[in-house]
Amino acid sequence: MTAGESRGSTTIAPLAVARAVTAAALAVPGVVALDHGRLGEFATHGRGGRISGVAVRGLGAEQRVAVRIVVDGTMPVLPIADAVRDAVAATLGDHPGGPPPIDVHIADVRDAPSPDPVPASSGPPPTTVT
Amino acid sequence: MTDTSEITAPTAPKNPGAGSGALAQLQTSKGTTTIDDAVVAKVAAIAAREVDGVADLGGSLTGAISSVVGRIRGAEHRTSGVGVEVGARQAAVDMSLKITYPSPVHQVADAVRQNVIDRIESLTGLEVVEVNIAVIDLAFPGGEEGDEAAAPSGRVE
C-alpha cells in the first residue's frame, strides 16, 4: 500500500500485508487454518518468502485482499467470514482511505474444532512456506 | 508518485483449480464472502452420517476402493457420495446412501433429508431447494465390508 504524502510516500510490501492478514484471520474463533488452494497457488509472493492462503493484489487505493479460510464445521460459517473480514479490516485500519475490500472464501470445513486458536504472537505465522 | 500504473486492475482473485466453479457469493461494500462447493458437500456428508440407519455414503466407486480413498483422505470427510449444486443463494444436493438393514428406508431417507437441510441452512445460510437421495445398497451389520469396529465374525468368542 502506498500513502502519498507531500514529502514522500510510504509503501508496505504485499508480503507484509499478507503476514498481518494471516495473523488476524487465524486469531478469529472458528478459523482452523488458511487454505492455499488445490495446487498451493493461492499465495502472496514477495522478497522474503511467500504467505499461503492470502492474496494481496494492487497497491494503494486499488488494493484488494483475498483470504481463503478453513472453518470449524460445527459453527455457522457466514459469521466466521464476517468476523475475519472485521479482524483483517481492523488490522489494516490505517490503510489510506480505509481498509481495502477483503474477499473471504470459505474453502473447507473441518469437523474437529481446533483445541485453542493459533497464537498470533510474534514470529512467522505457521502458514509461511519457505 | 505511486507506481500503480504497472498494476493491472485488481480483478476477482483468480484461483484456478480451486473448487469446481459455482460459488455461493455474498457481496458487500467491504468485500465478498464465497463458500466453496466442497464446504456444502462436506456439511451434507457429515449431516447424513449422523442419522441412525445410514451405513455409508456411496459413490461411483466400489466399497473397497472408496474405503481406501477414505482412509487416505480422512474417512469422516468422505464426500464421494455427495454432489452439490450451489448458486448465489440456494443449494441443491444429490446423495447416494447405503442404509443399514433392517432400518426403514423411507424414514431414514426423510431423516437424512431433514438433517441435511437443517445443517446446510443453519451453517451456510444457503436455502436448500432439494435433497435427492438415492438408496443404492443395504448394509448388513457384521457383514464382510462393514466398519473396522465390527467384531470379528467368528462363531464364538
Image (tube, grey):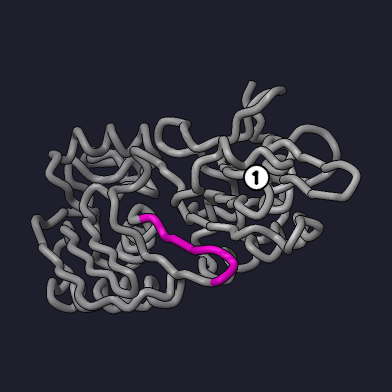
Q: Residue furthest right?
A: A7
The residue at the point 70 percent across, 57 percent down is: A88
Identify the subunit bearing mark 1.
Answer: A
Query: Where B69 sits versus A106, above or below?
Result: above
Query: Where B130 sits versus B80, above or below?
Result: below
Is the C terminus of chain B in the top left, top right, bottom left or bottom right quadrant?
top left
Residue A28, given in percent of the width and then of the height, sits at 69, 59
The residue at the point 11 percent across, 57 percent down is: B138
Q: Secondary structure at mark 1?
A: loop
Q: Which span is picked out in magenta? A: B29-36
State how many labels appear: 1
The residue that mark 1 highlights is A59
**B36, B122: nearer the viewer:** B36
Left or right relative to A102: residue B36: left
Please name the amino acid that badge 1 sits on.
Leu
Q: Is residue B30 magenta?
A: yes
Residue B71, given in percent of the width and then of the height, sits at 35, 35
Is there any visible trace of residue B75 in the rendered image?
yes
Q: Is residue B122 magenta?
A: no
Left or right relative to B141: residue B134: left
